[in-house]
Every structure is written in C-alpha cells, then in structure tokens.
Amino acid sequence: MGYDQTIDDAMTSVVTPLKDILIALGGKVLTGMEAERLVETDGRITKLVLRSAGSSPGEAHQVPANAVGDDWQPTRSSSGELYFVKRNDRGDYAALSSRCTHMGCPVALDPATGGFACPCHGAKYDRHGLPTAGPAILPLPAVAAELRGDAVHLAAAPLQSATEYAADYFVLACDVPGLKNILAHSEISDQALVSSVARLGVADPYIVWRIWLDRELRTQYVPFYTVSGYRYVDSIAIYSQLQPAYEDWARRRRGAVVELHAYAVEAHNVLPEAEIKRLMRAELDELIPELQGAGVIHDIYMMQQNFPRWAPGDHAGRPGVTTPFDNLFLAGDFVRLEVPANLMEAATMTGRMAANRVLAAEHLRENPIPAVALVGPLTTGA
Ligand code: FES
C-alpha cells in the first residue's frame, strides 16, 4: 500500500485550516458540544439539539461498590461508554464522564499526574477533572454516582440547558455509537431508518499506545508498517521519523517515539492495561530489536470501541448517504457505499457525497468525487 500523509498532525494540517476556512466563509464552529437529538416537524428535520459535552443523557450503569477504590478507575457501560469512578474521603462516590470537552474523544488516566489526558489533541485535566493544558476549556462532566445496596449507580449528570439549531439541511457525520445515540434520543417517524441505524454494530475494541523512549533510533525506518502474526501489534508508526515535532523531541532528548496499534482485540485478549502493555512491549522489542531495554519516559494508552463492525450480512441493512428525509444525510466509514472505499477514505467520500446532495438540492453544481473504476482494465464485458 502507498500512503500520502500530512507533514504535521491532522489537527494542524487538516482540521484547523478547514475550520479557519469555514469561519472565514461565515460558518460557525462549536466545540465542547454534543449533538443530542434531531427534531422532526411535518416530515422534515428542522432542528438539532445540542448540549455541553458529556451532559447528554447516558445509560444507567452500575459498578460493585467493593470494586471502587480511592483512586479513579475506569468502568464501561454495556454500550461501551467509559466512565471513571472513585470513593471520596467522606465515603461517598464521585464519577466523571470520559468525554473530553474539546471534541469528545475518551480521555485516559494520566499516571504522571493522577489526572486525565486526551490522546486526540493533547488536552490534560487534573485529578478533579479540571482542564490544565491543551485545547479543552471546560472540566470533564461530572456524573451522578450513588451507593444503592452493594453497587454504585452511575447516571448522566443533571442535564444542562440545551441549545437548538434550526437549519435547512443536516449531515450527521459521526461514528456508529454517536449516530445510534442521536437517533435513540430523537423522535423520528421513519422506522426503517431508525432500525437500520439500531442494527449497526461496532467491532472488537482497538488499542493505540504511543511511547516516548529514552533511546535514539540509529536506523532510518519506513515510518509506518503494518505487521501480522502478533497477538496484539498490527501496525507501528515511528513518530520520531514521521512528524517534525517528534523528530525535534527525539533529537533534543536522544530518544524515540513510536506508536503501536492493535485492531479488533478479541474478548479473551482484553486483559488489564499493564498486562497488555507488557505483551505489546515484548512484541515491539521483537519488531525493532534496537529498542530492547530502552526506558519509557512517557506514554499515552487508549482502548476504544467505535470502529464499525463488518460482519456477514451487515452490508444489506446499512444506511446510505441519503435517508428517507430529503434534508438529512449521513457520512462516515460505516455508511453503505457502492464503490470500494473504506476507513478514512469512505468517511471523506460519504462526506463529499452528502455535501453534493445539498448542492444538488440548492440547484448548484456538484463537485466531482474521484473513485477507482468498478471494473478492471482487462474486463471483456462478457
Ligand atoms: S478531543 Fe481534542 S483534546 Fe480531546
């Protein structure tokens, strides 16, 4: 495979410049907000209701009280939502949503501070969930935690007031859990759309582990590899030979930064974080022997479960870019496509297709979308 890659990270090279263009064109960009539900009126979608990140209604979740200690510990609801819970000095319980208030990525515990770190754009929070660094300006949302019997019950924090946005067209460009959540809270009359979204699933969880090591790499590697045959590691990105900020750090500190990915981790391989790190480190040592024995200065580890599932039979019921509503469109890597594109390419392509549907509805020229040919050059047509 060949990849084109941005020189800097995606936030610097893609997201921020796009945001600036949208704002220069008169657009409005809201971050730290979650889309909660759509409002349908007379067969059209008329409004989107937004709330502060993490304050949308969550599902009830409980943790055995004897499993909750004095330090934050992660706990997942049955739909995969991640919370942190702990016992306070007073003997009552506290819980936080893991949703970063910048753009909603799940934060991870930051062992260096006892607080939280977001792997997406570097937001950090202290042990009370208050932002200390990076782009987040709001604290992690508190979640009500109450002891009932021998279990701690978690529920979404009291709802904050909602903001409603009216618009002519809506494009929902979310991951599968996000889309399911919005539709589950919306009163939508078209049951075919509701059930095709409800049937969407997520794959087994994946792991991203970025490690700062105290040893320089003397060999110049290709900066991104996919590998096979390992229990966890499916790909390696050598950031200290990939992006200028990491190259610079590695030069100054005589170190190296690598990122290991594990995709679709089967249930029996979902072990405690420390054990997974130990096993992945052993695989890294085998893959890049010159890093054997190098010390870890810093690391960011996350396990998430929001990749779309591609199980047999899933394709037939998948929703497409257009929906039964003529002003509601979907974009994302899970959306049904008739051309061979997946992952980020599919997300981009469906986003552009949705934008074209809006242009067409406004009687404006659509933008061409390049795609590979659906038949090979040697096809005879027979
Ligand atoms: S989502 Fe951007 S820093 Fe967390």
Image (tube, rainbow, N blue to C red):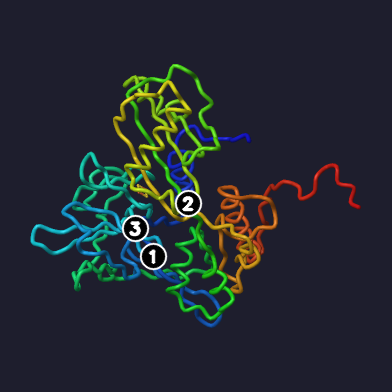
Q: CA distance from mark 2 to mark 3?
A: 18 Å
Q: Residue at x 56, y 79 (%)?
A: 191
The answer to whether 259 appears left or right of 6 in the picture is: left
State which quadrant residue 142 falls in: bottom left
Q: Amino acid at mark 1?
A: Ser
- Badge 3 marks a residue whose secondary structure is strand
Q: Amino acid at mark 2?
A: Glu
First along the sequence among labels 2 and 3 = 3
What is the residue that sits farthest to the front in this orientation?
A: 268
Residue identifier under label 1: 78
Residue 352 at x, y = what percent?
A: 60, 54
Residue identifier under label 3: 82
Judge whether 230 appears above or below 380 on screen: above
Q: CA distance from mark 1 to mark 2?
A: 16 Å
State which quadrant residue 276 falls in: top left
The answer to whether 57 appears left or right of 69 in the picture is: right
Neighbour tally class for label 1: few under 14, some 14-19, many 20 plus, Cα within 10 Å: few
Residue 137 at x, y = what percent?
A: 27, 51
Q: Amino acid at mark 3?
A: Leu
Neighbour tally class for label 3: few under 14, some 14-19, many 20 plus, Cα within 10 Å: some
Q: CA distance from mark 3 to mark 1?
A: 10 Å
Judge whether 15 appears above or below 351 on screen: above
Residue identifier under label 2: 266
